[in-house]
Image (cartoon, rainbow, N blue to C red):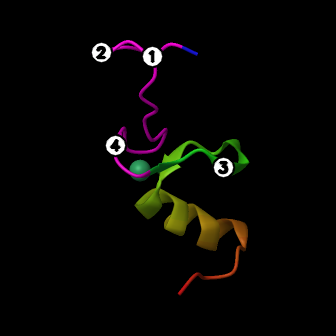
Amino acid sequence: MIEKKGKGKGRIRCVECGNADAVIKKYGLNICRRCFKDNALMMGFKKYN
Ligand SMILES: [Zn+2]
C-alpha cells in the first residue's frame, strides 16, 4: 500500500464534529474520542476509565 504525503482522503474525520484528531475507526463509528465518549454513553457502552 502506498501512501502519498499531503492532502488526501486518508484522513478520517469525526462524523460528529469534523475533528481529525484521535478519531476512532473501530466499530465503524469514525468519531473522535470526545464524541465517542458522548455516543458511547448514549449507546449504553460501559464507561472507560
Ligand atoms: Zn467528534
- Where's residue 11, x and y in %? 41, 28
Task: Give the class, few, some or many, for how many residues have Cα within 10 Å of label 2's Cα (few <14, many ≥20).
Answer: few
Whether ligand 1 has any atom under 8 Å from the Cβ at mark 2 is answered as no
Amino acid carrying label 1: it is: Glu
The tag earlier along the polypeptide, 3 or 2, is 2
Depth-wise, is mark 2 or mark 1 nearer the camera?
1
On residue 37, which mark appears?
A: none
> What residue does disc 1 label?
3
Q: Are marks 2 and 4 in contact (CB under 8 Å)?
A: no
Amino acid carrying label 2: it is: Lys
Depth-wise, is mark 2 or mark 4 nearer the camera?
2
Outermost residue, front side: 1
> What residue does disc 2 label?
7
Amino acid carrying label 4: it is: Asn
> What residue does disc 3 label?
26
Is residue 46 inside the magenta stretch?
no
Outermost residue, bottom side: 49
Q: Is residue 1 left or right of residue 44?
A: left
On residue 19, which mark appears?
A: 4
3D distance between C-alphas at marks 1 and 4: 21 Å
Q: Is residue 44 left or right of residue 37?
A: right
Amino acid carrying label 3: it is: Lys
Task: Give the class, few, some or many, for how many residues have Cα within 10 Å of label 1's Cα (few <14, many ≥20).
Answer: few
3D distance between C-alphas at marks 2 and 4: 15 Å
Task: Give the class, few, some or many, for how many residues have Cα within 10 Å of label 4's Cα (few <14, many ≥20).
Answer: some
User: Residue drawn at (63%, 45%), measured in percent from left and top?
Assistant: 29
Whether ligand 1 has any atom under 8 Å from the Cβ at mark 4 is answered as yes
Depth-wise, is mark 3 or mark 4 nearer the camera?
3
Q: Which residues are magenta?
A: 2-22
3D distance between C-alphas at marks 3 and 2: 23 Å
Residue 48 position (above or below residue 6): below
